[in-house]
Image: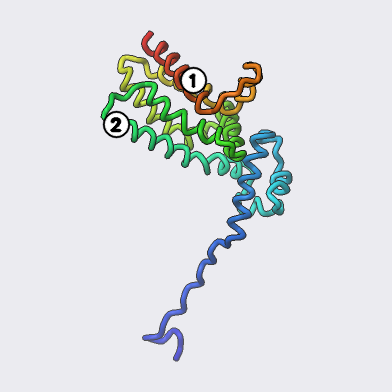
Amino acid sequence: MNSNSPGSVPPSQPRRRAVSKRSLTTSLSILDAAERLFAERGYEGASVRDIAKAAGAQIASISFHHVSKETLFERVVERRASELSQLRLDALAALKQRQQPVTLEAVLSAFLRPYLEKAGAGDPQWLAYARLVAMVSADARWHTISERCFDPTAGIFIAEIAKLFPRADSSAIAVSFIFSVSAMLSLSTSSWRIEALAGGNRQAMDQLADQLVRFCEAGMRAALEA
């Protein structure tokens, strides 16, 4: 019977080949290596060749999996941003479900602690990511990444703070929030500096997080109630 005759079964479409486990492993290895090297050397200092070598992959693999160095950089920042955002939003949701008034300290804690807990847990990849976020936040050329990956969640927390200070100017809230974010980034990447200045007295990250939240709460309250 002719395959095109009435009643015949049409030829099946070619099936799209699933991504192999090996291919996925290679892609993740490239992301991990890029995360470490971008954090250590900056965007310009981390070459595609060095990233491929650190990942145990061919240079062509980076183009195959991640198109370009710039796209790779964006994907490195993006992949943990969604997890971090969800942790913050979950903490905020849990806070609002309590039968207690929402306080500024609690809102700041919900935003700051998930990041510090990840950065201070000892995972070298999350520590590298903390350095990477600090770099992205300090460089205006990456503003589109910050706007896409971090600003939506930041906006939700700023709106919660605005509810607590209805008479405060929106720009004052934004400035105070950025000051708090900067302090968080500094703490997550410079705890060694604190230890050195404290004469070798080392504090756990949860203790440092307590101090940071209190510091940011006092500074923000002073600015917004002025």
Q: Earlier in the sequence, mark 1 or mark 2?
A: 2
Point out residue 125 in the picture as x, y percentages from the top left corner: 60, 40
Seen in the picture, residue 136 relative to 212 is either above or below; the reply is: below
Label 2 near label 1: C-beta < 8 Å? no
Q: Report the quarter where the C terminus lies.
A: top left
Q: Which residue is mark 2?
A: 98
Name the residue rendered at 60%, 28% in the picture: 189
Q: What amino acid type should be assigned to the residue bearing mark 1?
A: Gln
Circle 1 sits in a helix, a strand or a loop, which is it? helix
Seen in the picture, residue 12 relative to 163 is either above or below; the reply is: below
Point out residue 32 in the picture as x, y percentages from the top left corner: 62, 45
Name the residue rendered at 73%, 44% in the picture: 50
Q: Tell me how the rendering is colored.
A: rainbow
Q: Which residue is mark 1?
A: 211
Name the residue rendered at 43%, 21% in the picture: 174
In the picture, the disc for residue 44 is: none
Kindly give the residue lying farthest to the bottom in the view shown.
1
Kindly give the residue lying farthest to the left in the view shown.
99
189 horizontally vs 159: left or right? right
Q: CA distance from mark 1 to mark 2?
A: 23 Å
Point out residue 47 in the picture as x, y percentages from the top left corner: 71, 41
107 horizontally vs 215: left or right? left
Circle 2 sits in a helix, a strand or a loop, which is it? loop
Point out residue 14 in the picture as x, y percentages from the top left corner: 51, 72
Q: Report the quarter where the N terminus lies.
A: bottom left
Q: What amino acid type should be assigned to the residue bearing mark 2?
A: Arg
Name the residue rendered at 60%, 44% in the picture: 72
Seen in the picture, residue 125 relative to 13 is either above or below; the reply is: above
Mark 2, other Cα within 10 Å: few <14 / some 14–19 / many ≥20? few
Q: Report the front residue among 76 and 169.
A: 76
